Image (cartoon, helix red, strand yellow):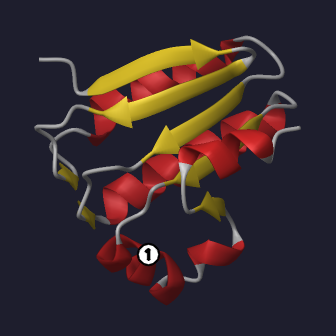
Amino acid sequence: MAIIHIKKENEITLASFDQEVKKFNALITEEVKQELSALFESPNTKLIMDLSGINYVDSSGFGVFLSLMKRANNNYGGFKICNVAVDVKELFQLLQLHNVFEIYENQEDCIASFY
């Protein structure tokens, strides 16, 4: 089973979790990090992480988000997040990460923010 699904929309890459995946935790972070980090090997990559269906993110998951943000900044790209569940959004706020990441309510607004 693929954990992450990736599709391109114009010059933006959209990544989402398989619908079976409900938690972004230490069990899957390494695989997800490797797959998504590889996208930033080409410069100016614009990546949107769609968290639809994810109802829990642990510290290793947030670590992957931070790592992807760093990769994006180092290659003149972008990394944004959308469709965050209420419980997960509260964790972003608790960790003060809502100030670090651009988080959008839906994929359409997230895509539009790149233009």
In this view, the residue in front, 42 or 102, is 102
- Residue 97, quarter of the rendered image: bottom right
Direction from residue 19 to residue 98 in the image, left or right? right
Residue extending furthest toward the bottom: 94
Residue type at mark 1 is: Lys
Direction from residue 94 to residue 24 in the image, left or right? left
Residue 32, x across and y down, in percent = 35, 31
| Residue plotted at (56% across, 44% down) | 107
| Residue plotted at (46% across, 30% down) | 15
State the residue position of label 1.
89
Up-down: is 55 above or below 38? below
Determine crowd level at label 1: few under 14, some 14-19, many 20+ residues with C-alpha closer than 10 A: some
Residue 28, x across and y down, in percent = 21, 38
Instruction: Give the quarter of the figure containing the C terminus.
Output: top right
In this view, the residue in front, 47 or 109, is 109
- Residue 72, quarter of the rendered image: top right
Up-down: is 88 above or below 28? below
| Residue plotted at (82% across, 40% down) | 114
Instruction: Give the quarter of the figure containing the N terminus.
Output: top left
Up-down: is 54 above or below 17? below
In this view, the residue in front, 48 or 43, is 48
